[in-house]
Amino acid sequence: MTISATSQGLKPGVCTSSNRPVNPFDGMMIYETDTDKVLVYDGTNWYQPSNIAWGVMGRAQKTSDTSITTTTTDVSGLSITWTAVSSRLYKISFTCICAVNTANAFLTVGIYDSSNNTKQLSRGTGGSSSAQFGINGFLYESGLSGSVTRKLRSDVNTGTASIYGAATYPFQFVVEDIGAA
């Protein structure tokens, strides 16, 4: 039987993640209202269709200030671990408001893997002591699989620096699945 209509769509089963259909069939599609996900049953498991973005895989934020020194160190609380799928493309990004405490010093914030290998670096300088500025950074990665960790590390070339965080302007770190690689 063929169902066709130009003014209507097919309505998948609507449920929550805790009350999915008990006897699904191969190819059955559902929409989970609590996770806002469309899932398809493959005869064994529910999975998200590969041709759409899967959304935020992880988010971390700091709502308190962080002091930065000349030693490259992890930024406490800004690490994300997720289960990656090799056929997916991930966008990993951060944004923060900073200040250096020494004139013409520059602050570096970078995205690193769990072995402290550099994946992306961003630098900023306030030009004068205590001048505020923003630093943003992002990268795209594919070919990842299994448990993957990305974290933020930071240092300043001379003196000290501050990365600010508050409820109204948190230091944000996000990993998003943006679609098929």
Image (cartoon, helix red, strand yellow):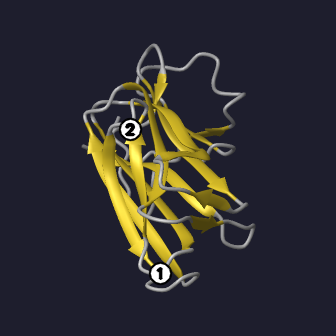
Q: Is residue 71 above or below residue 98?
A: above
* Label annotation for residue 70: none
**Relative to the observer, which residue lies in front, 78 or 12?**
78
Count neighbours of disc 2 (C-alpha within 10 A) and say few if under 14, some if 14 to 19, many if 20 or more: some
Count of labels shown? 2
Q: Secondary structure at mark 2?
A: loop
**Residue depicted at x 54% and y 67%:** 96
Q: Position of residue 111 (x, y in %)?
A: 40, 49
Pointer 1 residue: 103
Q: Name the N-terminal-most of marks 2 and 1.
A: 2
Q: Are marks 2 and 1 in contact (CB under 8 Å)?
A: no
Label 2 or label 1, whichever lies nearer to me, is 1
The quarter of the picture where residue 172 lies is: bottom right
**Residue depicted at x 54% and y 82%:** 129
Specify the amino acid type for callout 2.
Answer: Pro
On-image quarter of the C terminus: top left
Pointer 2 residue: 49
Q: Position of residue 130 (x, y in %)?
A: 58, 81
On-image quarter of the N terminus: top left
Measure how far apart labels 2 and 1 are at the Cα level.
51 Å
Q: Position of residue 53 (x, y in %)?
A: 40, 49
**Residue depicted at x 49% and y 76%:** 134
Count neighbours of disc 1 (C-alpha within 10 A) and say few if under 14, some if 14 to 19, many if 20 or more: some
Position of 74 with respect to 147 (left or right) is: right
The quarter of the picture where residue 142 lies is: top left
Q: Is residue 3 visible?
A: yes
Q: Secondary structure at mark 1?
A: loop
Specify the amino acid type for callout 1.
Answer: Ala
Q: Is residue 51 visible?
A: no
Q: Position of residue 148 (x, y in %)?
A: 42, 30
